[in-house]
Image (cartoon, rainbow, N blue to C red):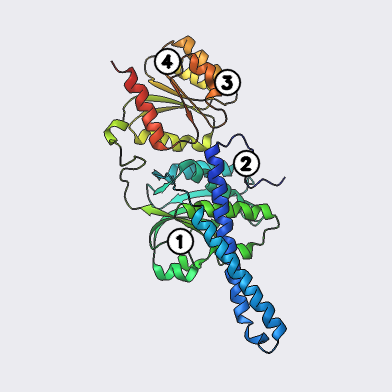
Amino acid sequence: MTRPVFDPTDKTFSGEERVANLLALSRGLHTALQTLLQSVRSYGELIEDDVEDRPGAAAYLTTSRQMLDRGLLWLDVFQRNTRVPNEFEKLDIRPMLEGVVQRCRKILPSKVDLRLEFDTEAVIVEGAVFQLQDTLLETLQSCVELLDPEAESLTVRVEHCQFGAADLSALRCRCEPGLYAVIHLRAGPAVPFRLAECAGFWDGMLRLRLADPAGELRLLHGFGVFLEHGGDVLFGRDPAGLLLAVALPAEAKRKDMQVDPHLDDEALYGTETILLVDDEDMIWDVIIDMLQELGYSVILAGNGLDAVDIYRDNPGLIDLVMLDMVMPELDGHGAFFRLKEIDPNVRVLLSSGYVSEEDARDVLDAGAVGFLQKPYRMVDLARRIRSIFDAAAP
């Protein structure tokens, strides 16, 4: 079954996510169409001399060039008038990629060995954590679909690379010169990333010639997301070598990660113990990393039943329960009321990307201390948790 590129009626997306996804898709389509029209115009200039003595053909060529110029002008106006300021934060994409790779292993044939390698302990970029996570998963899944059926191993490697202006210009790469985190995917074992082995995004798209147009649109959506993050997507020149590389602007040092520099950093930190209850294994590492970066100790439960058992077995040791509302076995609604039976004073912060705050009104009225709609920024999570603990302080 063909997977949709993006379904704006999907209720699991918030209004903000729908806008962000549509803008990213439009950015990818815009850039691809702009490159396509520029290429067609260049081909027209190459054949201009061949029709010099044929007035009819020359007139058609002139008209075509005028139409292309008008189309390029429209695209330029569209781009300049549809940019929306992004609310990015510093984050380490290492735990995010670990979750993405873990999820992809579940869809790969059992014979394919999928590996993840890093050249450094932390990979710090600025971005929207949940959008990047979803897009990296979608991009990796699209690449898996392009694999040679005989492939036995696939390696995702992340390393830091310094991009120079000359190299980027030769590739028509849209990145600015500087330090980048490059996430590259290869069939077979990983080797150090080399920009010289790459082709620009448009050249790679022409070479792919995917049978499913929706597959190309999914790549264009991802392309748009990475462009919005100041990065780019590159393809390998040799089908047996580099398959795809995503470049994102990186920071060399782990400084003030995920903390808004306009806030008092000390006010966001804590030492309490938080029980995280969520069944989405792909985001466990991301949220745990967020919480631990703020100083909290974290205990993980994969469903509501485990959460109830853990809370019962650790009386007085858990300061806050972060409870997802939609889970198998025992959902957040049922888990909350069981926790209340164990401890009437339990502090529970509800969270979900599938239901709204109003849908959880009965739980909030019964004593839950708040609701956090996914996806959320690190600073939103930090503020909400500290407000809960500070309100309870004597």
Residue at which label 2 appears: 8
Residue linked to disc 1: 193
Q: Which mark is residue 330?
A: 3
Structural distance between the alpha carbons of marks 3 and 4? 18 Å
Amino acid on which disc 2 is placed: Pro
* Location of residue 287 in the rendering, given as x and y in whole percent from the top left corner: 44, 35
The answer to whether residue 234 of the structure is visible from this angle is no
Amino acid type indicated by mark 1: Phe
> Residue 298, relative to residue 363: is it above or below?
below
The amino acid at mark 4 is Val
Which sits earlier in the primary sequence, circle 1 or circle 2? 2
Upstream in sequence: badge 4 or badge 2: 2
Front: mark 4 or 2:
2
> Are the two marked residues, 1 and 2, in contact with CB atoms closer than 8 angstroms?
no
Q: Report how far apart the C-alphas of labels 1 and 2 lie in the structure.
A: 36 Å
Depth check, mark 1 against mark 2: the one in front is 2
Looking at the image, which residue sits at the far bottom?
Answer: 53
| Residue 356, image x, y percentages | 55, 27
Question: Mark 3 against mark 4, which lies toward the viewer?
Answer: 4
Give the CA separation, mark 1 to mark 3: 45 Å
Residue drawn 51% across the image and 17% down it: 363
